[in-house]
Structures are given as C-alpha cells and as structure tokens.
Image (cartoon, rainbow, N blue to C red):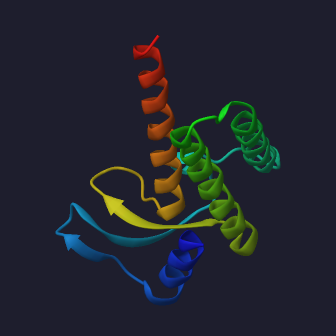
Amino acid sequence: MVSLVSKWLSDSFLSERIAIVGSFAGLEPTQNSGIAFGIVLPGSLQDVTIVLALVLVAALALRTAKVPLEQIGFGLIVGGALGNIFDRIRDGFVTDFFQVGTFPVFNVADSCITIGVILLLAEMMRKKRNM
C-alpha cells in the first residue's frame, strides 16, 4: 500500500528532480518499462518472466518460511513485487523516483524487495552458523 501511495504521490507532484544531497541523492521521476535495473525483455517474455518469478517466490515462501525473519523477508519480496506489478498494470511501466549516486533510480517496492532478500540471506547465514 505504501508503495502504491508513494508512486501516486510521485506521479502527481514530482515533475522534475529535487536534490536532497546535491547531485548525489534526490527525488527524480522516471518511468521504467523494464524489469530489474531497467532491463527490457522482448515481447511478452518480460510479462511471463515477472509472473513466473512471483509464483516461484510465493511457492518457495509457502514451503520454506518457518521462522519470523524468513516470513518477513518473503513478505517484503512478494509485497514489493505486487506493488510493482499493480503499477505496471495501471500505467504500462513502473514509476521510480529515488536517485542515489550512479545506482539505477528505484522506488519503495524495489526497496522492500532488496530488504527482503537481505533478511533471507541473513537468516541463511544464521542457520549455517548454528549447524
């Protein structure tokens, strides 16, 4: 929900870059018609890849997420993916607006996905250490 509201706010009020930390970080409205890092796949392959990835992650979550950190991690990943999918269905592209350094411009949903992956990796490392 936060992702969709932030994208709506960006679409409604952000028409040009707003510097937050000079040229290093700011709010910069962009339209991403691709997938991760703006990679564009040909034809319907992109849509199939997005849906397949979401289904695989959701199935993996249902089978393996036993502890709270895994459940939160998978929840962030699936929630972020759904936020981007809803945005893509609405506009035909994903609205991105956070600009930091030379990293590709991203949004709240992308941040949720990234944090979810970090939580899953942290839990995997914790489990491996306790073996």
The residue positioned farthest toward the top in the image shown: 131
Tell me where residue 92 sits by quadrant. Answer: bottom right
Residue 127 in percent (x, y) is at: 48, 21
Left or right: residue 116 compared with residue 47: left
The residue positioned farthest toward the left in the image shown: 22
Location of residue 21 with respect to 61 vertically, above or below: below
Residue closest to the eye, 76 or 108: 76
Tell me where residue 55 sits by quadrant. Answer: top right
Left or right: residue 35 compared with residue 15: right
Query: Who's the residue at 75% across and 38% down the image?
Result: 62
Residue closest to the eye, 70 or 27: 70
Residue 129 in percent (x, y) is at: 40, 15
Residue 83 in percent (x, y) is at: 64, 64
Residue 68 in percent (x, y) is at: 55, 43
Circle count: 0
Query: Who's the residue at 59% across and 74% down the image?
Result: 4
Quadrant where the N terminus lies?
bottom right
Left or right: residue 98 compared with residue 54: left
Query: Who's the residue at 63% across and 34% down the image?
Result: 66
Residue closest to the eye, 119 or 45: 119
Location of residue 86 with respect to 123 vertically, above or below: below
Query: Who's the residue at 59% across and 48% down the image?
Result: 77
Location of residue 92 with respect to 82 vertically, above or below: below
Left or right: residue 126 compared with residue 57: left
